[in-house]
Image: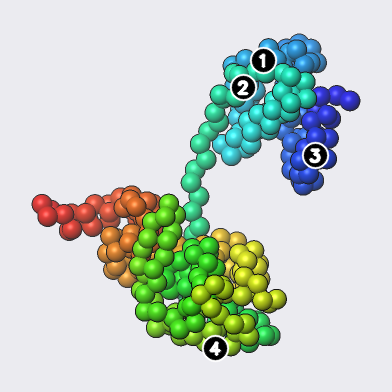
Amino acid sequence: MGLLDGFLNYVQREQRHADNTVEAYRSDLSEFFGFLNVHLGDTPSIRSFAQLQARDIRAFLAHRRRDGLADASIARLLSAIKSFYKWLDRAHGVENPEIAFLTGPKKAKRLPRPVSQVAAKDLLEQAEAIQAEPWIAARDVAALSLMYGAGLRISETLDLPGDMKTPPQRLRLKGKGGKVRIVPLIPAVVDAMTEYANLCPYTMRKDTPFFFGARGKKLQAPVLRKQVQILRGTLGLPETATPHALRHSFATHLLANGADLRAIQTLLGHASLSTTQVYTGVEPGHLRKVHASAHPRG
């Protein structure tokens, strides 16, 4: 069995990667092997892999970039090569420190695009309409309302405890990095939570979740994401219309309607104002205006 086949057999049988992932490895590494065959003037062997230098890998990546590959594809190629070398070390004792320290192009930070205010309203209305079971319909509306109407992350929404049966006027949340924030709940969100709590067939206590799945266990994120996927298909919305996009929309729509950037930062739980600026898509010129109007020496 050749080296490439040995590696592919490993990732498929031992690591149990999906067929698509295995095929991606096959395609990427076949390109790499083919390049080395020309670059080295011979079929690459265990010894040649052990002796490859960082400049050889960079030459391959540069060759593929000239073919028109984007940064994301270049990063994937390098990741495949590094995975192959990890297997070489495990299976054949081949160590090549130069490869481990190679870095690819940084991935651009992709943020979910906000849905429009009309689309957000349609999502909430349709979430109620497409569910046959009234309590599940109310549950989905309440969960989506918290993300769009209060800016909660999907994990924060689904982690709410059962003692929210009577919704408070303000939520105390612990977000990323243990950062605590207070989020006020607007009447529409309180009403949605109350409607769900009244219809839910399962007992809510402090030690139970607020959001239940159909079988009485804690509602899981993939279930809610799948529901939103169905909703956007029904409404003809793009794939970027995800649960997290509702949190993004919360911030963006507040900003568009004149909310203070610092207030949005607090509501989202961001430690840095620059994070909020990027997250909400604020243009630098607008940020300077906000800073100038707020700064005591402005």
Left/right of residue 192 with respect to residue 137 in the rendered view: left
Task: Identify the mark at residue 99; answer none if there is no mark.
Answer: 2
Asked if marks 1 and 2 touch (Cβ < 8 Å), the reply is: yes
Q: What is the crowding at mark 4: few (fewer than 14 residues within 10 Å), some, or many (at least 20)?
A: few
Which residue is drawn at the image coordinates 24% and 52% (left, top)?
288
Q: Earlier in the sequence, mark 4 or mark 2?
A: 2
Q: Amino acid at mark 3?
A: Glu
Q: Amino acid at mark 2?
A: Ile
Q: CA distance from mark 4 to mark 3?
A: 48 Å
Report x, y in % for residue 243.
54, 65
Which residue is drawn at the image coordinates 77% and 20% (left, top)?
92
Q: Which residue is mark 3?
A: 14
Report x, y in % for residue 29.
74, 30
Q: Secondary structure at mark 2?
A: helix
Q: Which residue is mark 1?
A: 52
Q: Earlier in the sequence, mark 1 or mark 3?
A: 3
* Residue 229 seen: no
Q: Amino acid at mark 1?
A: Leu
